[in-house]
Image (cartoon, rainbow, N blue to C red):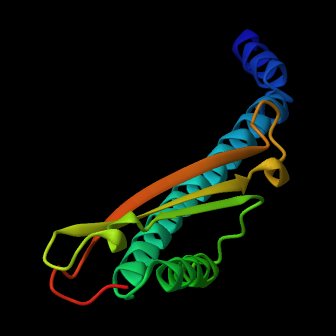
């Protein structure tokens, strides 16, 4: 009879512990999921900004003069970011077209640099920054023997 009483006491002493464990562990799991979403968003945006810089430099290197190279680079970067579904809060775009000033026969390059500020504030985790600025630079060669203006 005393064994039965001991078993009944043990069973009653664990009552409610599952609810308490769930109440303690659930916020931690939700926070970890939020961090995974934030890191995934940053990595995705970083790859998209890198691809946009690559597309911009390549598009600029195919042109024959600096003004059209800059406009084509900007259009290629915007198309690339829009195609990847990336929306930047702020977008800074620069292209170095000084290679077009060199004479034909000299090796020249064009460099595109893109900075994009990705928004993280909608994730809603305490301590998470509201935004992250991502920057990518890519250099593409200009055809050495093609005419330049």
Residue beneath the point at 39% across and 88% down: 63
Q: Quadrant of residue 103?
A: bottom left
Q: Is residue 140 left or right of residue 123?
A: left
Residue shown at 84%/54% (left/top)?
Answer: 122
In the image, 15 versus 73, the foreground residue is: 73
Q: Nearer the viewer, residue 145 or 132?
A: 145
Could you tell me residue 95's position as x and y percent? 49, 65
Is 100 positioned to the left or the right of 118 in the image?
A: left
Judge whether 142 appears above or below 38 on screen.
below
Residue at the (47%, 81%) spot, across then down: 69
Residue 102: image location, x then y, percent: 27, 69
Quarter in which the N terminus is drawn: top right
- Quadrant of the rendering where the C terminus is positioned: bottom left
Please report the residue visible at 51 percent of the width from the left and 57 percent of the height from the top: 46
Report if residue 129 is visible in the image.
yes
Q: How many marks?
A: 0
Q: Image height check: is 14 above or below 32?
A: above
Going by the image, does 109 lie left or right of 49?
Answer: left
Measuring from the top left, give residue 31's x and y in whole percent: 73, 40
Q: Is residue 39 visible?
A: no
Q: Quadrant of residue 114?
A: bottom right
Relative image position of residue 15 (x, y in whole percent): 84, 28
- Out of 27 and 56, give the one closest to the viewer: 56
């Amino acid at each position: 009879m005393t064994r039965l009483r001991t078993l009944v006491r043990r069973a009653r002493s664990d009552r409610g512990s599952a609810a308490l464990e769930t109440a303690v562990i659930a916020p931690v799991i939700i926070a970890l999921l939020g961090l995974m979403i934030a890191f995934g968003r940053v990595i995705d945006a970083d790859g998209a900004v890198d691809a946009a810089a690559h597309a911009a430099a390549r598009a600029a290197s195919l042109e024959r003069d600096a003004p059209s190279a800059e406009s084509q680079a900007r259009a290629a970067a915007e198309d690339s970011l829009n195609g990847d579904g990336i929306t930047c809060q702020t977008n800074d775009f620069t292209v170095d077209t000084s290679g077009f000033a060199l004479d034909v026969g000299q090796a020249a390059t064009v460099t595109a640099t893109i900075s994009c500020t990705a928004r993280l504030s909608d994730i809603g985790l305490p301590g998470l920054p509201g935004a992250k600025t991502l920057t990518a630079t890519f250099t593409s060669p200009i055809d050495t023997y093609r005419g330049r203006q």
